[in-house]
Amino acid sequence: MTRDEQFVITINRELGSGGRTVGKRLAERLDVKFYDKAVLKALKEKFHLTTEEIEKLKGKKEGWAEFQRRVVPFAEVEPDFDGYKEASNIITTEEVFKVETEIIKGITSGESCVILGRSAFYVLKDHPNHLSVLIQAPMEQRIERIMSRQKLSREDAIDAIKKVDERRETYVKTFCKTSRYDTRNYDLVISMEHLKEEDAVDIIMDYVYRQSK
C-alpha cells in the first residue's frame, strides 16, 4: 500500500483487543475518515438502502457523491470502546451483506479511509491499494479490558467475548467463505500483548511508510 494514491486500510479485531481505538487513532494520524459497523448500520437505517437503490445512486452523475457527503455525520455513532451488544440476536441476511458490500465499495471509490470490522477485509481484497490488518490480544487482556471498559463481571465479560467471537466468525464463514482468524487474509497481524494502542498505530504507520518508499 502506498499513501501517494487513494488507499484504504481495513482493520479486523478481536473484542477487547483495543482494535477500534487503534483504527480511529490511525485514521486521525493519516487524516482520513474512519468508518465502523455503526456507520454502516446507521446508513442502512437512515436511507433504507437496498442493492438496487445503491446501483441507481451510482448511475447518477452526482448521486453517489452526494450520498458520500451525507455519510460524514454518521462517522462517530459508536462509542469509543469495543461494545458487546452486537452479540444480541441480530440476524444478518444475504441482502444485508450485499448492501454493506456496496456501501463499503462505494465509500472507498471516492476517498482514502480506514474501515473497521465486518467484511471489509474480504470485500476489498482486490482493491489495488489496500492494507489489511488484524488486531489480536491474549484472552486475559481482553477480559480485563471488557471488565474495565464496560463495567462487567468477569463471568459476563467472558460470556460477551465468546458470543461476539462466535457471531463474527459465523458471519465471515457464511458470507466470505473464509475464517477471520486465517492470517493469509491480512498483510499485517498485530498482537496487543505488552502494547498500547499508540504502539500499534506506530507499527502500522511504519509499515505504511516502508511500503510507500
Image: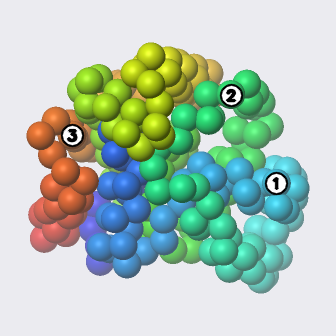
Q: Residue at x 36, y 46 (%)?
A: 19
Q: Which label's residue is closer to the chain start, 2 or 3?
A: 2
Q: Is residue 59 above or below residue 95?
A: below
| Alpha carbon distance from label 2 to label 3 | 26 Å
Which residue is labeled 3 in the image?
A: 192
Which residue is labeled 2 in the image?
A: 88
Hey, what amino acid is under mark 1? Glu
Q: Residue at x 76, y 40 (%)?
A: 96
Tell me, yes or no, whether the two marked residues, 2 and 3, touch with CB atoms within 8 Å: no
Q: Nearer the viewer, residue 13 or 163?
A: 163
Q: Nearer the viewer, residue 108 or 157?
A: 157
Side of 107 relative to 161 (left or right): right
Q: Is residue 86 above or below residue 111?
A: above
Q: Nearer the viewer, residue 51 or 82?
A: 82
Q: Residues within 10 Å of mark 2 (few under 14, many from 20)?
A: few
Which residue is labeled 1 in the image?
A: 45
Q: Position of residue 173 (x, y in %)?
A: 55, 21
Side of 150 relative to 203 (left or right): right
Hey, what amino acid is under mark 2? Ser
Looking at the rendering, which quadrant does residue 36 occupy?
bottom right
